Image (cartoon, rainbow, N blue to C red):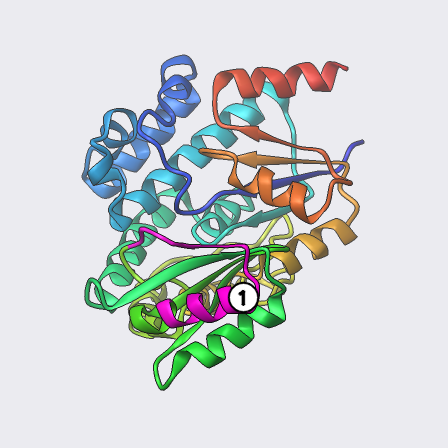
Amino acid sequence: MAKWAFLFPGQGSQYVGMGKDLKDNFKVAADVFAESDEALSDNLSKMCFEGPESDLKLTMNTQPAILTVSIAALKVLQQETGLEPSILAGHSLGEYSALVCAGALAFADAVRIVRKRGMFMQQAVPAGMGGMAAILSLDTELVEQACREGAQGEHVAPANYNCPGQIVISGHMEAVKRAVVKAEELGAKKTVMLPVSAPFHSALMKPAADMLAEALASITVSDIKIPVLSNVEADFYPSKDDVKRLLTHQVNSPVRWIEQMDKLLQQKPDRALEIGPGNVLCGLMRKISREVPIQKVDTPDDIKGVVESLKG
């Protein structure tokens, strides 16, 4: 029996039209969209299928939208292939999709929580005060040095350790800009200021983490049936009792994706699937390691491709 890893994408993977072909072709996907709309008392599915992009890009919409499309794709994949994963991981928001897949969170609860998470993250820092930037082709230690030198009494630090040579930094806008200049001086081949509405995964998100902890208090967490890697500790969740703690800390802690994928590779999966919109995690995995083949599951054609590969 092949050992499968399922990975779930985070914010930034969204696009107008996502999930529509799944909904139109599979009742199980249509049911997921209906459940999401009902849980939020909002026509989120219409926003996924038709936009406008400006609404879909709002963090409070993006997060439940990506979660919903990811779970719709998961349900179709499992219906059509019967595949069961051995290991799960999700990038930032994607960790909620992984916990739903593992049976730890009910889908409707997760959708409601990530909408609140998006709102809390949006509210934590006034617009324009925080920023994020991607630093490319620079060693991790030098990125961390650029942040230390750029801080000058403000906050800036790595937020996403995505893959070797791609680290995202986050913090006060001016500190981020100074760190970008330092990174370029230290040899970064390319730096990109990111079009985000808040400094995600930085210490500035502590107010959002506090509000999320309150919101999570009322949610029931069930046993984790499939091992899930956490962004905060880059290790498997010890038990269901750690879910609320780690999801709270995740908001204002860096995503340690490189270490998570190293841990995943130690488990020797035969294949990996990125389940949800886009193919960001496929790209990161190929830069981290090519020993595990990975393909995306976003559309009916992608699912057909997995079915074909199982026959082969």
Q: Residue at x 74, y 49 (%)?
A: 265
In this rendering, is residue 207 above or below 308?
below
Quadrant for the C terminus in the image: top right
**Residue type at numbered disc 1:** Val
Front residue of 78/210: it is 210
Residue 235 versus residue 9 in the image, above or below: below
What stretch of residues is rendered in magenta? 177-196
Question: Which residue shows up at 26% across the image and 38% down it?
Answer: 56
Identify the residue at the far front of this view: 185
* 249 w.r.t. 121: above or below: below
- Viewer-closest of 172 and 218: 172
Q: Residue at x 31, y 36 (%)?
A: 36
- Does the magenta run of residues contain 212? no
* Residue 262 relative to residue 127: left or right: right
The residue that label 1 is drawn on is 232
Q: Give the image location of residue 40, x and y in percent.
A: 23, 42
Residue 30 placed where, x, y %?
Answer: 36, 23
* Residue 179 is a magenta residue: yes
